[in-house]
Image (cartoon, helix red, strand yellow):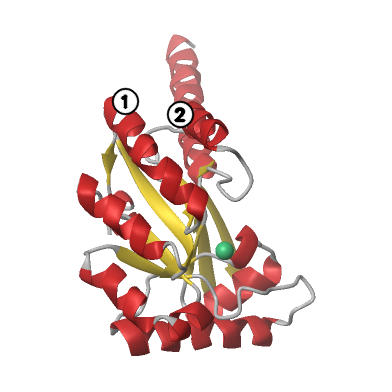
Amino acid sequence: MRKLKILVWISCLILLILFLQEEAISIETEEDIFGLNLVRSLGGNSQVRKEVALTFDDAPSPFTKEVLKILDNYGVSATFFLVGSQVEKSPEVARQIVAAGHEIGNHSFSHCWSSDDSVETLVEDIKRAEEAIYRSTGQVPLYFRPPGGMVNDKVKEACGQTGYGILLWWVDSRDWLLTEEEILEKVKKEVKDGAIILFHNLATTVEVLPQVIEDLRREGYKFVTISQLLRY
Ligand SMILES: [Zn+2]
């Protein structure tokens, strides 16, 4: 009888550990299976300590060179999500991003997606961006970030078909909307180990970036690219 009780306790303990592990995993990943495709959305990596990844969307823009200059001054590596149509307009800036040692991601060709778009339309847009990026940089990105962070079943299916994982973020700077002070406060409040932080290539981004880097460094954070953060 006593043996049985011990056995029941051990079983409960194992179940509890399994449950907690499952919880920990589900916080950081979201997996969906469409046929044979496995699409994973990630906004960070909870397994790392004191590392964050700065990401800059909608590149290249007229402000990208300034962003690059700041990153270079501080010796920071980051990830830029490129829009195919903008890459075609400024291929030299796309090349400059890569030459500076930063990572690049695919952020669609048109940057104009609607929830009414068919999977075929989305697939075509993703591939067109990939071709534009490859033509100008010689690289094929590993990650895709949907325009506006739009994630639905059709986007997941399109990413599955084109072989991309969906990359989002844990911290949204909202640099397209907030004032410099508000951005600094939001990032400082929301940052945590392993976070992917979302910025854009805007005038406000350029203004606030040096202080963001200094604040996070003071907190002991190291800046890495997405691949480094996710340990690829
Ligand atoms: Zn965007």
> Residue visible at 45% across and 9% down?
2
The answer to which image quadrant residue 47 occupies is top left
Judge from the rendering whether residue 176 lies leftward or rightward of residue 166; answer left or right.
right
x and y, in percent, of residue 119 in the image: 68, 81
Q: Which residue is mark 2?
A: 188
> Residue visible at 66% across and 62% down?
150
> Residue visible at 22% across and 54% down?
72
The answer to which image quadrant residue 21 occupies is top left
Q: Secondary structure at mark 2?
A: helix
Between 22 and 125, the one lying in front of the other is 125
Judge from the rendering whether residue 113 lies leftward or rightward of residue 33; answer left or right.
right
Hey, which residue is sitting farthest top in the picture? 2
Between 1 and 5, the one lying in front of the other is 5
Q: Which mark is residue 219?
A: 1
Judge from the rendering whether residue 115 lies leftward or rightward of residue 185; answer left or right.
right
Q: Is residue 192 above or below residue 136?
A: above
Residue type highlighted by circle 2: Lys
Q: Secondary structure at mark 1?
A: loop
x and y, in percent, of residue 116 in the image: 79, 76
